[in-house]
Image (cartoon, grey):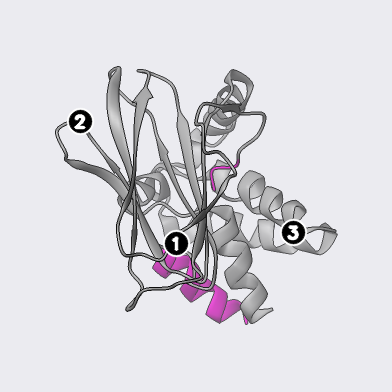
Amino acid sequence: MRKILSMIFIAASIQFAFAQEKIFAPNGKIINFDGREEVNYILNLKKGNTYLFSVYQENIDVEVILMSEENIKIISTDLADGNKGFDKLEYTPNEDNAYRLVIKSVSPAFVPNGIIKINVKKLGKKDIAKRKRIEEELISEDNKTITTIDIQHFWEAFDKLGNSKTYQDSVNIIQEHYLDRSTNGLKEFQKVRYFSAEFFVERIKKYN
């Protein structure tokens, strides 16, 4: 099983929402989404703040995209299973501006019973400080490759999953003991394809 999970890690390789400030009106609201048309929201984001965009999907497979005011794609993700799961993006603007969050279906056909839930949150100062502290502790490890120290962190987190009592416990463990400890190599990879703690928890459940 470890071989299978290692393949998942390498192929797919959370930023966890701690005490975060809600800034988005539809947060948590169930939206019926059959995929016929895109869902678009304009967000006024502030320079230097770190935002987490989370889209829950059920019965439908979606892609989540963050676009600039000039209609240029900044970052996107489509990692959740179409049946049920989360797609997440994280972004820190370098200027105050209006950005567009786009959710579009990538399912092969319309899905009459598809639903999505959107959350946009701002990471708190304590959470950002905690990440920075972890980064400083790991700075000596950052020259190592993803396939060494990051995989070691993954298995350390995996071994701790036996102590989890709930799904959220598992998500928290993967986030804190694996993703929050990412080396620079893994962080660079994440800039291309963002993935979440929920993504790894769901994959582990399949093969455990």
Residue with the mark numbered 1: 147
70 is within the stretch colored magenta = no
Q: What label sits on residue 164 in the rendered view?
A: none
Instruction: Name which residue type carries label 3.
Output: Tyr
Q: Is residue 74 above or below residue 117?
A: above
Which of 128/53 is in front? 53
Residue with the mark numbered 2: 69
Q: Give SS at disc 3.
A: helix
Query: Badge 3: how crowded within 10 Å, few (<14), some, or many (20+)?
Result: few
Contact between marks 3 and 2 (CB within 8 A): the answer is: no
Q: What label sits on residue 167 in the rendered view?
A: 3
5 is within the stretch colored magenta = yes
Q: CA distance from mark 3 to mark 2?
A: 37 Å
Q: Earlier in the sequence, mark 1 or mark 3?
A: 1
Instruction: Name which residue type carries label 1.
Output: Thr
Q: CA distance from mark 1 to mark 3?
A: 27 Å
- Say which of marks 3 and 2 sits in front: 2
Instruction: Name which residue type carries label 2.
Output: Glu
- Quadrant assignment for the C terminus: bottom right
Query: Badge 2: how crowded within 10 Å, few (<14), some, or many (20+)?
Result: few
Q: CA distance from mark 2 to mark 1?
A: 37 Å
Q: Is residue 163 left or right of residue 94?
A: right
x and y, in percent, of residue 206 in the image? 63, 78
Q: Which residues are magenta?
A: 1-16
Q: Quadrant of residue 22?
A: top right
Q: Is residue 62 above or below residue 76?
A: below
Q: Residue at x 81, y 64 (%)?
A: 162
- Say which of marks 1 and 3 sits in front: 3
Q: Earlier in the sequence, mark 3 or mark 2?
A: 2
Q: Earlier in the sequence, mark 2 or mark 1?
A: 2
Q: Is residue 22 left or right of residue 165?
A: left
x and y, in percent, of residue 95 in the image? 28, 18
